[in-house]
């Protein structure tokens, strides 16, 4: 069984190195506006301008990157993962937060989509 998440992005080429730094690999590439990335059983579809997911809805609203729903990526070394992500265009939405289950930080990919890195205790 696998899970699929679709993120709208404004530049697929800018997002691929960011997600590769987080352990994803490019599984498929359908021209400039779309790529399927995989990490374990998760498939991440990054959809840029011109894809069906970016077309205006019936009410006229335009799908855009961003928001607060996010994928959570479990990492062994959160400091290293943050550094690698920042080297590929990540912006921090939060500082490192510690809780009873471990540590987390909220990043933005190059398109502004949130990604939570989580290091369990």
Image (cartoon, rainbow, N blue to C red):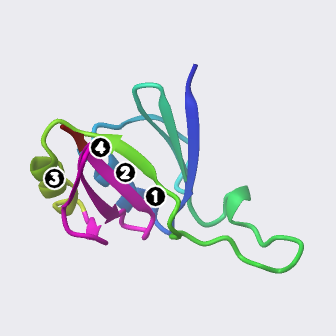
The CA distance from mark 4 to mark 2 is: 6 Å
Circle 2 sits on which residue? 16
The CA distance from mark 2 to mark 1 is: 6 Å
The CA distance from mark 4 to mark 1 is: 12 Å
First in sequence, mark 4 or 1: give its number. 1
* Percent of width and height locating residue 105: 26, 59
Task: Assign a secondary structure to mark 4.
Answer: helix
Quadrant occupied by the C terminus: top left
The CA distance from mark 3 to mark 1 is: 18 Å
First in sequence, mark 3 or 4: give its number. 4
The CA distance from mark 3 to mark 2 is: 13 Å
- Disc 3 + disc 2, Cβ < 8 Å: no
* Percent of width and height locating residue 26: 41, 37
Magenta stretch, residue numbers: 89-118
Circle 3 sits on which residue? 84
Q: Residue furthest top?
A: 1
- Disc 4 + disc 2, Cβ < 8 Å: yes
Q: Residue at x 66, y 64 (%)?
A: 50
Q: Residue at x 53, y 59 (%)?
A: 69
Front tag of 3 and 1: 3
Front tag of 4 and 1: 4
Residue 104, above or below 40: below
């Amino acid at each position: 069984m696998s899970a699929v998440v679709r993120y709208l992005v404004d530049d697929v080429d800018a997002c691929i190195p960011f997600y590769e730094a987080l352990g994803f690999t490019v599984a498929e590439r359908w021209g400039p506006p779309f790529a399927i990335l995989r990490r374990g059983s998760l498939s991440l579809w990054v959809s840029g301008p011109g894809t069906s997911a970016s077309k205006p809805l019936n009410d006229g609203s335009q799908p855009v990157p961003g928001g607060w729903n996010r994928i959570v990526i479990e990492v062994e070394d959160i400091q290293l993962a943050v550094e690698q992500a920042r080297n590929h265009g990540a912006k921090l939405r939060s500082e490192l937060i510690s809780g009873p289950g471990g540590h987390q930080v909220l990043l933005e990919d190059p398109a502004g989509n949130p990604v939570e890195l989580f290091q369990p205790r």
